[in-house]
């Protein structure tokens, strides 16, 4: 047995709920703790503990992430009415992801994990396509009016000194609808920095697209902010890294993506990112085969799985029934965080271990050993369907012989 890999700075560990909490422990016990002398600052974001601490633990975990720079997060329940009774909650606590995102001011990057035997529906996609979704504003923070009948609709901005700016939206002659949306230069700038830094970090081209030909002020503002920041701070670094930033119209981007080979980052406004990331991920196979990382402009990283707590499987597990839950996204959250910690602290063994664990995970699937969700969509023959624990143990066996 080799000596365990030593760490310098602690990783912020955010535990979570239900089936993913079960997977979390199995992953640590089988794939992390035997190999790494894990230094982590543990925050229990499980719903019971969030409730006990009045959700202070979520805030504390985000503060710790700002302090140390790298976090790994398990999927967590976002409470709704049913969860209020199920967990006897004091309050309907907000989504932890929302709280953490607001505190870290981040952009979410999601990329499919490419495995032979799980082929993308788009034949020419050879490499993953990473979606960078702006997570603030636009239609997600809208104000709407259902217009009952004839009348004048105007857009009014009142400056602090009382000066009004007005634009006519429409002179209604009958019933209709109006919507007001906004964004801020500060949020768009953070989004731009996060995208440029992530492109440099992963040495991939960055594409950005909006509809600025039609939205000459709103979308054009996104385009201009990206371009100003790129010219002022990133042009030389991109050239040195041999990567490219380019802006195009959203419809042109969609057409190009379908013909591309992959291997780039596609930055999208909030709505485009919502719609396009679901399209790209389902075309690549499954949400459980997707990495997800929140990157803040100050260079803070939070790694997670893109899927939820897999509630249905958890209830089976509680009844003592066997589950076959895919742990790949959660394993890749760990490897992403360990690799980043290794890079920041210059611990080559940690980076190598993260690479090796990812390779072992992919190889296990490519060798035909997988969970049920993948067995249903694979093109591989002679597949062995494993249960949740069996799959993690199979990865460990592969890891031991790599
Ligand atoms: P989910 O946990 O993503 O699961 C939805 C369905 O997708 C599952 O029932 C399962 O389908 C399949 N699935 C998802 N992940 C899988 C995996 N790793 N392996 C195999 N199958 C997988 O979404 P949900 O059930 O709608 O939400 C459950 C809880 O998660 C909610 O309380 C929600 O608030 C929370 N949530 C958290 C996050 C986060 O923390 N990032 C994100 C989304 C949702 P089958 O049942 O057909 O096998
Ligand atoms: Mg969506």
Image (cartoon, rainbow, N blue to C red):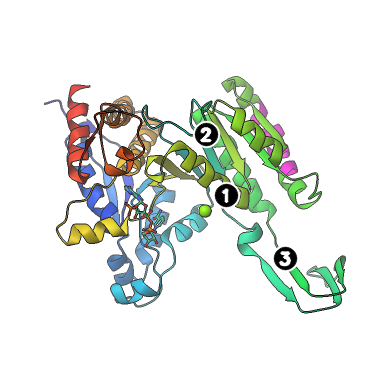
Numbered circle sitting on residue 237:
none
On the picture, is 271 further left or further right than 63?
right
* Mark closer to the chain start, 1 or 2: 2
Visible residue check, residue 282: yes
Tell me how far mark 1 sits from mark 2, CA to CA: 14 Å
**Residue 72 belongs to magenta span:** no
**Does residue 1 appear left or right of residue 52 in this picture?**
left
In the structure shown, which secondary structural element does the residue marked by tag 3 occupy? Answer: strand
Residue 108 is situated, as x and y percent measured from the top left of the image, at 51, 46
* Circle 2: element type: strand
Residue topped by disc 3: 180
Bounds of the magenta segment: 223-235
Quadrant location of the C terminus in the rendered image: top left
Among numbered discs 3 and 2, the one appearing first in the sequence = 2
Whether the residue carrying mark 1 lies under 8 Å from ligand 2 is answered with yes
Outermost residue to the left = 1
Q: Which residue occupies 17% across, 40% down?
A: 390
The residue to which callout 1 is attached is 275
Q: Which mark is residue 129?
A: 2
- Residue 206 location (% of width, % of height): 61, 32
* Residue 87 appearing in the image: no
Q: Quadrant of residue 161?
A: bottom right
The part of the image, by quadrant, that contains residue 54 is: bottom left
Q: Are marks 1 and 2 in contact (CB under 8 Å)?
A: no
Q: Secondary structure at mark 1?
A: helix
| Viewer-closest of 302 and 77 | 77
In 3D space, how far apart are the residues under numbered discs 3 and 1 (Cα atoms)? 20 Å
């Amino acid at each position: 047995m080799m000596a365990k890999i030593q760490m310098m700075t602690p990783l912020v560990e955010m535990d979570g709920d239900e089936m993913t909490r079960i997977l979390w422990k199995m992953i640590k016990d089988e794939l992390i703790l035997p190999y790494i002398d894990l230094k982590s600052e543990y925050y229990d974001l499980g719903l019971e503990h969030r409730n006990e601490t009045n959700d202070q633990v979520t805030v504390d975990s985000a503060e710790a992430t700002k302090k140390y720079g790298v976090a790994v997060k398990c999927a967590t329940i976002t409470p709704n009415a049913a969860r209020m009774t199920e967990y006897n909650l004091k309050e309907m606590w907000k989504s932890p992801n929302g709280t953490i995102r607001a505190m870290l001011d981040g952009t979410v990057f999601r990329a499919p994990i490419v495995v032979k035997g799980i082929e993308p529906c788009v034949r020419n996609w050879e490499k993953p396509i990473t979606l960078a979704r702006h997570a603030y504003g636009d239609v997600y923070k809208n104000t709407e009016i259902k217009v009952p009948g004839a009348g004048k609709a105007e857009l009014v901005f009142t400056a602090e000194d009382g000066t009004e700016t007005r634009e006519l939206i429409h002179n209604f002659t009958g019933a209709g609808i109006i919507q007001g949306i906004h964004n801020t230069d500060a949020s768009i700038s953070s989004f731009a920095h996060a995208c440029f830094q992530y492109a440099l970090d992963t040495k991939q081209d960055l594409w950005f697209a909006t509809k600025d030909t039609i939205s000459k002020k709103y979308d054009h503002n996104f385009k201009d902010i990206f371009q100003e920041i790129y010219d002022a701070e990133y042009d030389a670094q991109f050239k040195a890294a041999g990567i490219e930033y380019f802006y195009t119209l959203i419809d042109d981007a969609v057409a190009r993506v379908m013909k591309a080979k992959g291997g780039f980052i596609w930055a999208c406004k909030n709505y485009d990112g919502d719609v396009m990331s679901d399209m790209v991920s389902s075309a690549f196979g499954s949400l459980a085969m997707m990495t997800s990382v929140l990157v803040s402009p100050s260079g803070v990283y939070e790694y997670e799985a893109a899927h939820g707590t897999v509630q249905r499987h958890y209830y089976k597990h509680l009844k003592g029934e066997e589950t076959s839950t895919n742990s790949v996204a959660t394993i890749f959250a760990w490897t992403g965080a360990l690799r980043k910690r290794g890079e920041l602290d210059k611990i080559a063994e940690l980076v190598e271990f993260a690479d090796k664990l990812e390779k072992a995970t992919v190889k296990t699937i490519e060798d035909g050993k997988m969970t049920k969700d993948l067995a249903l969509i694979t093109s591989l023959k002679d597949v062995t369907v494993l249960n949740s624990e069996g799959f993690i143990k199979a990865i460990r066996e592969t890891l031991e012989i790599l």
